[in-house]
Amino acid sequence: MKYLITFLLICSLSLGFAQKSDSPYLLVSTKDAVIPLKSSKTAVDISGTIAHVQVTQVYQNKGTMPIEAKYVFPLSTQAAVHKMQMTIGDRVVNAKIFEKQKAQKVYVKALSEGKRAAKLDQSRPNVFQMNVGNIMPGDEIAIDIYYTEMLVPVSGAYQFVAPAVVGPRFTGESSSGNEQVFNTPYTMKGTSYTFDYDIKVTLNSSIMIQNINSSSHQVNVTYPNTKTANIFLSKSNENAGNRDFILNYNLRGNTIESGLLLYEHGDENFFAFQMEPTKKVKFKDIPSREYLFIVDVSGSMNGYPLEVSKELMRNLLLDLRETDTFNVQLFASSSTVFSENPLEVSEENIEKAIRFLSEGQGGGGTRLLSALKTAYKLPRKDPSSARSMVVITDGYISVEKEAFELITKNLGQANVFTFGIGSSVNRYLIEGMAKVSNSESFIATSKKEALEVAKTFKKYIASPLLTQIKIKAKGIEVYDVAPGSIPDVFSGRPILVYGKYKGKPEGGITITGYKGKKRFKQKLKISSANVSKKNKALRYLWARKKIEELDDYSKLFRDDVKQQVIALGLKYNLATNYTSFVAVDEATVNKSGALKTIKQLLPMPKNVNNSAVGAAAKVSKKTKFKKSFTISINESISKTDKRKIKMEFKALYSKLITKYLKKYKSLRIRFNGEGKVIRVEVLEKGKWVYAYPIIKELSNASIKRLNINKSMTLTLKK
């Protein structure tokens, strides 16, 4: 049975701090409440590299008076929202695009005249609000939202993400005073969501589809043929709408659908060019780097997200090279730093850092701007070394553009990598921070993925970037290319360029640049065979890319930029920060004008605790560390492997081993090639004695196995 949730402040009161009134809040259940959103269902059609998405939201009124529903929901950061429809019974009303202020006037006027109306506003590139007014008792009104996006593979792997819920945002650092969109009610953790959620995906490719899986949901897959797949949710999913839907797949041989797409529309012709450089370049001379790991331990990270962060950090630290240096900074309402100066990569220092991180507890507001300012002020061990800041967070803040601006102003000091932790992270922030720093972003929704993304990060920093990329057309005139200048890109990513062209589709396009220190050059022939009416989405994708360049990542407001975005939104029928869709049904149904506004409840994102809403606390300023024990490895292995095994062992077993060494002077532990403990001995009166109880306790402990590929013996001493 579905329940509405009414007002509760317990979470904020318990920690003695309440956020601003424009912050999210928790509600508790009542039986006889009006829940405006009946269902939200998504249909996805992926053809080649383009995803066409239809989101259908059905609103209802089971109460006794007319209502207005407000629902805040996410879409992809790359979504080009180009169409909206409102359906009432047999009537379908196509929404029109207006400048945002005019859209509001049209919507308010319709409500005052007693007409049903719907308005879609964009608050962030990935956050939208739907208003549906004059929903009469007994009504069901369906709103269809259509968007398209280009899927860009990484190292041959494709991923489609359908965001499902906007996580609660900390607004304490916002200076705009206009964050009402985040003044949203949430259900308490574990409460069943209040509307039906479903998603279905159809995959069509010119190449055989392989390895379809979802890291977020249980899915069922059918294959009409080797190049087509249908994916739908399994009934075994619980609360399927409280986390992003993530679909992963590959094409045969990890190839990508590269090449040129063309579309002709009236007096404008559009193209999209995607190419994966084929030359493999080994990059041996990796410079030493200084890493500053900035870890979010705020209230929204409390519990499982923080555990994932710790697992990620452990993997990242173990992959550092001996020539690197590092430091760790924890932040919530305030920051605390592991060391006054960057430290050498040593077994002892990494063990201390892991302990330091383990003592960090989730709680407090997410003051990211303050944390970044603190980070930029920290001293460097070697002024000539390259510094990388690695930010680990769920991104539940409202000051995205302020963060982008701060990073942009400090590009000379450090580049910024980002790791999004959680089931429904703020991808606009996670992707944007890395984008403006010309770095890379990663997402980890589980401990298993924390290991995988750590490996990906290691591969990334060991690979040369594609630099000084230039595109040149011959035999065809291209213009309005987006992006205007092609940024350096990760070697596992393809180059993706949108633009317009004049004349006949003939000639060729040449891409040049450098991969490491070696020059690369690739050519592609253009022919009329590339033109297709199926590529209609290119109009929207080109315009969306231009809007991204103008507005998404820049805080510096200029009226000419606003006017350019408005012009693009109106011409290409796109929802933007300054243009909105409005649908008005001409039938007058509410002559009295009485109307009750109801905000749709959002499910608390999976694994996010109630402390994410309206609470703040300080991070402890001190941490204590005591040296525990020494490890010697009997087998002959490389120094690097030996150091890594020692650090991993201490991260996994320190607590138990420290307990045993209080009783025994020394222990000897034997592992098999799979990392499983097979024998334990203790030193008693100068003799090694078999210790079965310790084996049993180690086996029963919920500790994952040591990551080794050969049997070995470790000797432990106080």
Image (tube, rainbow, N blue to C red):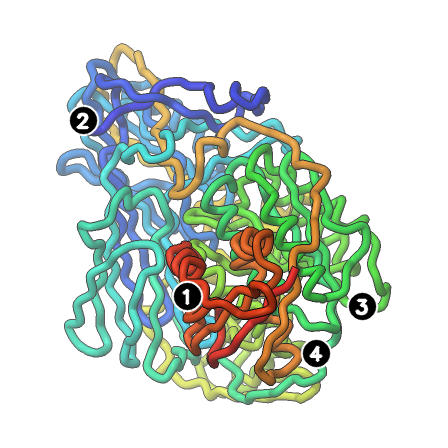
Residue 151: which numbered mark, if any? 1
Q: Say which residue appears at 49% left-offset and 64% top-offset.
A: 451
Q: Position of residue 604 (x, y in %)?
A: 39, 36
Residue extending furthest toward the right: 383
Q: Is residue 640 above or below residue 213?
A: below
- Quadrant for the C terminus, please: bottom right
Give the mark nearer the N terminus: 2 vs 1.
2
Asked whether 120 or 447 is in front, the reply is 447
Q: Quadrant of the rendered structure where residue 208 is?
A: bottom left
Q: Amino acid at mark 3?
A: Ser
Give the mark nearer the N terminus: 3 vs 4.
4
Q: For the residue labelled by badge 2, is the local secondary structure a helix, a strand or a loop? A: loop
Res 25 visible: yes
Q: Are marks 2 and 1 in contact (CB under 8 Å)?
A: no
Q: For the residue labelled by badge 1, is the local secondary structure a helix, a strand or a loop? A: loop
Which residue was labeled with disc 3? 385
Residue 139: which numbered mark, if any? 2
Q: Amino acid at mark 2?
A: Asp
Give the mark nearer the N terminus: 2 vs 4.
2
Q: Position of residue 178 (x, y in %)?
A: 57, 29
Q: Say which residue appears at 51% left-offset and 38% top-offset.
A: 300
The CA span between labels 4 and 1 is 30 Å
Label 3: few (<14), some (14–19) or many (≥20) C-alpha neighbours in 10 Å: some
Q: For the residue labelled by badge 3, is the local secondary structure a helix, a strand or a loop? A: loop
Residue 286: which numbered mark, if any? 4
Q: Amino acid at mark 1?
A: Leu
Badge nearest the viewer, 2 or 1:
1
Q: Position of residue 664 (x, y in %)?
A: 58, 58
Q: Position of residue 113 (x, y in %)?
A: 31, 19
Q: Is residue 298 above or below residue 291?
A: above
